[in-house]
């Protein structure tokens, strides 16, 4: 979304006050207030507020990404930034938003520098802003922000216990598998259900018994040492998934739930989750996950610039 200050209507950033409690890390001074990039400028997060008529607040008319930066021997670097922003561009285009990938790149790097973050989670968000109610977004102001916080790990980096959700994943012919804000209510419902049952995460399975993905992560299976990336038209085309397929030589194919339960190992993956071993799915318990551990260690070296494959995927801050 093009958000140059001369073409944008200045306005509030969604979640600004919530982000004010984020703790600083790395070299950030203890008394420095967290900062974010909003419509072309760096600002203190607690200086921004959202108008209560913001369209995205009422209808989910926004698109976002989850990106990670890592401390490397050469300084902080963002992992696969162009690929994340290209996916965000596709979502913005779908909603009729303008999107400038170069500006988004510069905004991401500027926000990391302003917060002095090295290991960080990065959240760019583009959305339709204030105005009257109604579903027509034409002519509405568009906004963009980039926020960075100290590293957030989805699934807490632990061996997760997973429940099969009674909810179905949004079908791709109803909601394309992109990071559209409103689409994630589906994941919230599944996550709430699984947590209420005492599990850590939820797994979506379609009506024909094929595995889709978890609420915010793709799924892999390991059988007899062979790695399979679960493929499904309703699943997000994960960038971490693509990375792990390249690193492991995994085959991508559809997998039934029964096949998943017969695997020797199962793991989830995503930008926040990285490589997260699954300890159990419903009543099926998995063992020590040696292949998963090996891939997790390799991935950790790649994102920190310690492997030959790293150079093509890291954008220096």
Image (tube, rainbow, N blue to C red):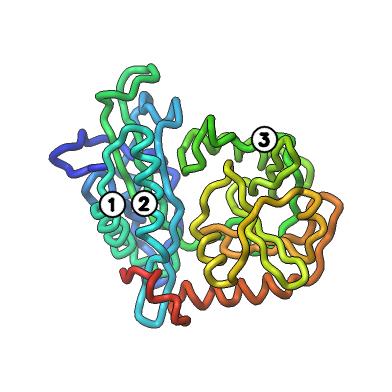
* One can see residue 155 in this view: no
Q: Tell me if 250 is positioned left or right of 15 in this view.
A: right
Q: Tell me if 38 is positioned left or right of 161 in this view.
A: left
Query: In percent of the image, x 75 and y 44: which residue is there?
Result: 164
Indicate which disc, 2 or 3, sits on the residue closer to the N terminus.
Answer: 2
Q: Are marks 1 and 2 in contact (CB under 8 Å)?
A: yes
Indicate which disc, 1 or 3, sits on the residue closer to the N terminus.
Answer: 1
Q: Nearer the viewer, residue 25 or 317?
A: 317
| Residue topped by disc 2 | 86
* One can see residue 192 in this view: yes
Describe the element under mark 2 as helix, strand or loop.
helix
Find residue 17 and report its horizontal and vertical position in percent.
40, 43
Crowd around label 2: few <14 · some 14–19 · many ≥20 (10 Å): some
Find residue 22 and report its horizontal and vertical position in percent.
45, 55
Describe the element under mark 3 as helix, strand or loop.
loop
Asked if 158 appears above or below 179 in the picture, the reply is below
| Residue topped by disc 1 | 101
Describe the element under mark 1 as helix, strand or loop.
helix
What distance separates the C-alpha of mark 2 from that of mark 3? 27 Å
| Residue topped by disc 3 | 168
Q: Are marks 1 and 3 in contact (CB under 8 Å)?
A: no
**Quarter of image, res 126:** top left
């Amino acid at each position: 979304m093009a958000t140059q200050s001369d073409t944008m209507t200045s306005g509030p950033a969604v979640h600004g006050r919530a982000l004010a409690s984020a703790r600083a890390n790395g070299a950030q001074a203890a008394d420095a207030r967290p900062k974010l990039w909003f419509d072309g400028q760096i600002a203190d997060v607690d200086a921004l507020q959202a108008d209560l008529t913001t369209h995205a607040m009422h209808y989910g008319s926004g698109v976002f990404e989850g990106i990670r930066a890592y401390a490397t021997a050469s300084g902080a670097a963002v992992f696969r930034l162009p690929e994340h922003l290209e996916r965000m561009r596709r979502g913005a285009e779908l909603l009729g938003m303008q999107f400038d990938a170069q500006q988004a790149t510069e905004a991401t790097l500027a926000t990391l520098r302003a917060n002095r973050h090295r290991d960080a989670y990065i959240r760019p968000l583009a959305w339709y802003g204030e105005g009257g109610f109604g579903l027509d977004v034409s002519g509405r102001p568009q906004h963009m922000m980039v926020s960075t916080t100290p590293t957030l790990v989805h699934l807490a980096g632990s061996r997760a216990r997973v429940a099969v959700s009674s909810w179905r994943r949004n079908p791709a012919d109803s909601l394309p598998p992109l990071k559209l804000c409103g689409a994630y209510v589906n994941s919230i419902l599944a996550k709430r259900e699984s947590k209420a049952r005492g599990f850590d995460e939820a797994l979506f399975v379609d009506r024909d018994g094929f595995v889709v993905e978890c609420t915010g992560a793709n799924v892999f299976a390991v059988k007899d040492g062979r790695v399979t990336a679960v493929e499904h038209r309703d699943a997000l085309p994960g960038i971490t998934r693509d990375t792990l397929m390249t690193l492991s030589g995994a085959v991508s194919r559809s997998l039934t739930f029964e096949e998943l339960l017969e695997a020797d190992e199962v793991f989830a993956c995503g930008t926040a989750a990285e490589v997260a071993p699954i300890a159990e799915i419903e009543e099926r318990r998995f063992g020590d996950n040696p292949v998963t551990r090996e891939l997790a260690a390799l991935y950790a070296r790649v994102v920190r610039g310690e492997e030959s494959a790293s150079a093509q995927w890291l954008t220096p801050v």
